[in-house]
Image: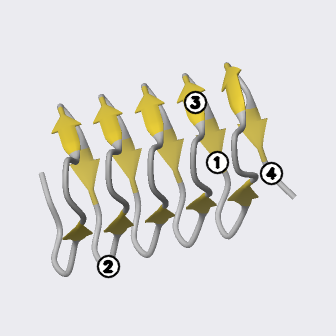
Amino acid sequence: MVGENVTMADKVTVKACTLGNGITIGAKTKLNNCIVMDGVTICDAVVLQNCVLCAGSKVDGNCNLNECHVAAKVTVAASTKTKGEIFAD
């Protein structure tokens, strides 16, 4: 499922995901089995597997997250590579 006003750059792969409204996805990004809520920004060269990104969150470039949850309005720092983490304020 894909919501309204979703912007995807070049070479984006999305498989088995639910995308909310007003999402921006950067180039060379891969999403697999993720839930991405409204207003999320995903920067370039990000790989997300089995993740939940809450409304207004941001994943900076070159991140690789597996089985992670990102709370609303939280930013994941660039080049973060982790599994099973919860990012919250």
Q: Nearer the viewer, mark 2 or mark 3?
A: 3
Q: Is residue 71 left or right of residue 35?
A: right
- Tell me what residue is drawn at x 12 percent, y 51 percent: 1
Q: Is residue 77 above or below residue 30?
A: below
Q: CA distance from mark 1 to mark 2?
A: 17 Å
Label ID, residue 70: 1
State if disc 1 and disc 4 touch (CB < 8 Å). no
Please provide percent x and percent y for residue 34. Answer: 36, 37
Q: CA distance from mark 4 to mark 1?
A: 6 Å
Q: Is residue 2 left or right of residue 23?
A: left
Looking at this view, name the residue that lies furthest to the right.
Answer: 89
Q: Check disc 1: other Cα within 10 Å, few if <14, some if 14-19, many if 20+.
A: many
Please provide percent x and percent y for residue 17. Answer: 24, 40
Q: Nearer the viewer, mark 3 or mark 1?
A: 3
State if disc 1 and disc 3 touch (CB < 8 Å). yes
Q: Check disc 2: other Cα within 10 Å, few if <14, some if 14-19, many if 20+.
A: some
Q: Is residue 65 above or below residue 84?
A: below
Label ID, residue 65: 3
- Tell me what residue is drawn at x 32 percent, y 46 percent: 28
State if disc 2 and disc 1 touch (CB < 8 Å). no
| Residue beneath disc 4 | 88
| Residue beneath disc 2 | 22
Q: How many marks?
A: 4
Which is more N-terminal, label 2 or label 1?
2
